[in-house]
Amino acid sequence: MWEMVLAGLFAPPILFFVLGMVSVFVKSDLHIPPAMGTAMVIFLMASIGITGGAAAIESLKADPALIGVIVAIALLAMFLGPFFAFMTGTLFKKFMRTADAWACAGHYGAVSSATVALGVALASEAQAANPAAQIFAGWMPAVYPFMDSSALIAAIVLGRMALINEQGGGEKADIKKVLHLTVFGMGVWVLVTALFIGMLSAVYSPGELSRALLFFDGMFRGIICLFMLEMGLAAAKQIGALKELGKHAVKALLYAFALPQVWGLVGILGAYAIHLAMPGKLFWGDAFVFATLAGGCSFVTAPAAMRANMPEANPSVYLPMAVALTFPFNVLIGMPMWMIVSQILWGAA
């Protein structure tokens, strides 16, 4: 178990993330062009989507009863997203302005595409290193939009209601706009459509799908390294903005570190409960990737949704917390912990 955890902690994507942060601290002129950053997000979401869609079809062909597990996981994701958003907003409003608290709630309830991409890479590496074992089936990212969209809608509706109560009036949440931003935003839209492409191709054109996957599988590990380099650069650059938190910085820091770890563990326990109810369908790698869905902190879909629907919130509060605090902590501490817990529960330790 420890060898596997160390292999994950010292995996090239993690080390590239550290390189990005160190590069900012030593004032290197290393940078990733914005257009390249956008292209990497598109590639990673497309790769995760098409691979997950194909894996879902192949898994269902091998075991049609798996559909019950997929539905159960999707329903769990739809419940956990709003629950995480509600709990985060309730805790944060004790020391933040109402708008900032509920904007943070959306970020900590929604899904971090970078965290999921790294989780998929680590789970895939573990499966490739032990091909005879059942570790990661590959379809878990398909539930991404169920948690992401439900969390953002819940945070915005609750936030707008809180502002109306606080101010005695105000603008109501535009649910249609929230849905459009969350479903048709670049990251989620590419992942969801690529998911369907993978599923349809697996059914009707498996030969062409195999050729396409040669490109996506071959490039994925290299692209995720460069993407994590960019995230390390972004995280280090956002640290200075945390001064906006003022006297509440320490409390915000503790919540930014602790809450995602709890959410990730809740995700693992939820997956384990489904595993106990329907044994033999979920493996520890699946639970680990579900933890990356539950324990991530969005900085792709959530900032866009909050900027449009919670303009009263201060981006200098919620964005640095997500990028400069939670994401690095998840990468270096949270994900190894989730991996260990998943292995212990599934008896792989």
Image (tube, rainbow, N blue to C red):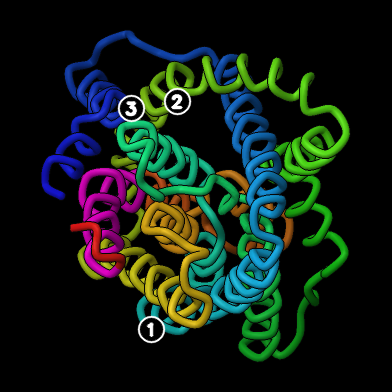
In this rendering, position of residue 137 left or right of residue 320: right
On the rendered image, what quadrant is the C terminus found in? Answer: bottom left
Q: Is residue 344 magenta?
A: yes
In reply to whether residue 207 is colored magenta, the answer given is no
x, y (%) of residue 10? 19, 31
Q: Residue at x 76, y 79 (%)?
A: 170
Side of 169 where 275 appears, left or right = left
Residue range highlighted in magenta: 324-345
Q: Amino acid at mark 2?
A: Ile
**SS assignment at label 1:** loop
Residue toward you, 91 or 69: 69
Please state which amino acid type lies under the numbered disc 1.
Lys
- Between circles 2 and 1, the one closer to the viewer is 2
Q: Label 2 to label 1, Cα distance in Å?
A: 37 Å
Mark with earlier residue (2, 3): 3
Q: Secondary structure at mark 2?
A: helix
**Would residue 317 be visible to someone looking at this image?**
no
Marks 3 and 1, the one that precedes in the sequence: 3
Q: Name which of mark 2 and mark 1 comes first in the sequence.
A: 1
Q: Label 3 vs label 1: CA separation?
A: 37 Å
Label 2 neighbour load within 10 Å: few <14, some 14-19, many 20+: many
Report which residue position mark 3 lands on: 13
Crowdedness near tag 3: few (<14), some (14–19) or many (≥20) residues, C-alpha within 10 Å: many
Q: Is residue 332 above or below residue 290?
A: above
Do labels 2 and 1 touch, CB within 8 Å? no
The residue lying toward the viewer, choosing from 126 and 6, is 126
Residue 74: x, y in percent? 65, 68
Q: Which of the numbered marks, if any, corresponds to residue 94?
A: 1
Q: Nearer the viewer, residue 83 or 215?
A: 215
Res. 296 image quadrant: bottom left
